Image: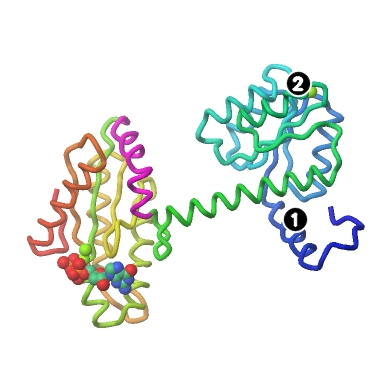
Amino acid sequence: YITKDSRYSFDHVMKVIERLRKNQHIKALVADDSHTSRLFVKTLLEQYRFNVVEAEDGQQALAKLEEDPEIRLFITDHNMPLINGYDLVRMLRHNNRFKDLVVIGLSTGHNSALSAKFIKAGANDFLKKPFYHEEFHCRITHNLESQEMLETIRDLANIDVLTKLKNRRYLFDEGESFYQQALSHGDGGGFAMIDIDHFKFVNDTYGHMIGDSLLELVGKEISLAFPESLTCRFGGEEFCVVSNESDDVFEQKLVDFQASLRTKEFTGAKIKVTCSIGVCHQKQDSLDDAVRVADKKLYEAKNNGRDRIEL
Ligand code: GH3
Ligand code: MG
Ligand code: MG
Ligand code: MG
């Protein structure tokens, strides 16, 4: 893959080395009923430093993908017993869990419509056997890099840069389905809005940089306090939590969080802060409604003296 072609620049070689370094952390699954074919692809992938697992038929491949979320690259033959490669790709693409899996189809060149079928079904790419090794490498690298770029862009769009919590955009795009799912699981579906008290005072007294690092630290505390929930930075010094736990468990966690925040000293300046919390107690039809209710409760918590929870 660094061929004898002398036109390759130093930059190109460095890029290849960087790619090989990343590949070490990527688990690839090779599905092929032919032992020889499977071994051949596996050996090639191992030369590129991938961590390779194998499947002998479509059903085994599906089982391995379902049980191992670390598999990020899937190279599949078409003609296999139990489930063929094309049907397998269609099944995977109907499951949101596998939306980030890079899938490359492989087959002998008899059926010229097969590559289009694979790609229409959602495969990232397709190669006819036998293939030129360097083309195999280029296509895999190209598809992995596109996928990685997509994930970076998605993170940039959904994650708050300062606190690394999900942002408001994510809350309104994806939060609704999280909320509905939580509601459907028995007594989940709590929602809380958390606002730091007198945060303007922190900025005015210690400066915006310290204010920023305090927001970062509070964000970290929130993600630690509600690991099962969807935690977001709603904006400014306001955070929110969509819970999929029962009301009792959620409310206890809110009480504990508020109490622990009271005792913490943040940054080198040993700043202490408190927060007010508004909780949407009754289940609402939509996340928008839950936000509205919790916001009103938060306003009450502020009016009733701050550093308190209103249910
Ligand atoms: P209250 O107890 O009523 O919530 O008072 P407060 O001062 O926390 O609320 P207010 O809404 O008056 O002020 C919020 C402040 O948060 C003002 C704004 O400058 C600051 N803020 C918002 N976003 C950021 C940020 O990203 N970094 C920093 N350092 N400050 C921020
Ligand atoms: Mg086969
Ligand atoms: Mg505030
Ligand atoms: Mg506020």
Q: Nearer the viewer, residue 199 or 129?
A: 129
Residue 47 appears in the figure: yes
Residue 288's place in the image compared with 295, above or below, is above
Residue 290: percent from left, percent from top: 21, 43
* Residue 173, picture quadrant: top left
Q: Nearer the viewer, residue 245 or 166?
A: 166
Residue 4's place in the image compared with 27, above or below, is below
Q: Residue at x 20, y 42 (%)?
A: 289
> Which residue position holds label 1?
20
Amino acid under disc 2: Asn
Say if disc 1 is inside 8 Å of ligand 2.
no
Residue 228's place in the image compared with 86, above or below, is below
Q: What segment carries the magenta color?
A: 167-185
Q: Helix, strand, or loop for circle 1?
A: helix
Residue 197 appears in the figure: no
Q: Residue at x 80, y 46 (%)?
A: 46
Q: Are marks 1 and 2 in contact (CB under 8 Å)?
A: no
Q: Nearer the viewer, residue 59 or 171?
A: 171
Q: Nearer the viewer, mark 1 or mark 2?
A: 2
Residue 252: percent from left, percent from top: 24, 49
The image's mark for residue 79 is 2
Residue 39's place in the image compared with 1, above or below, is above
Q: Nearer the viewer, residue 214 or 118?
A: 118
Crowd tier of the residue under label 1, counting other residues whose Cα lies within 10 Å: few below 14, some 14–19, many 20 or above: some
* Residue 107, picture quadrant: top right
- Prevailing secondary structure of the magenta residues: helix
Residue 20: percent from left, percent from top: 75, 55
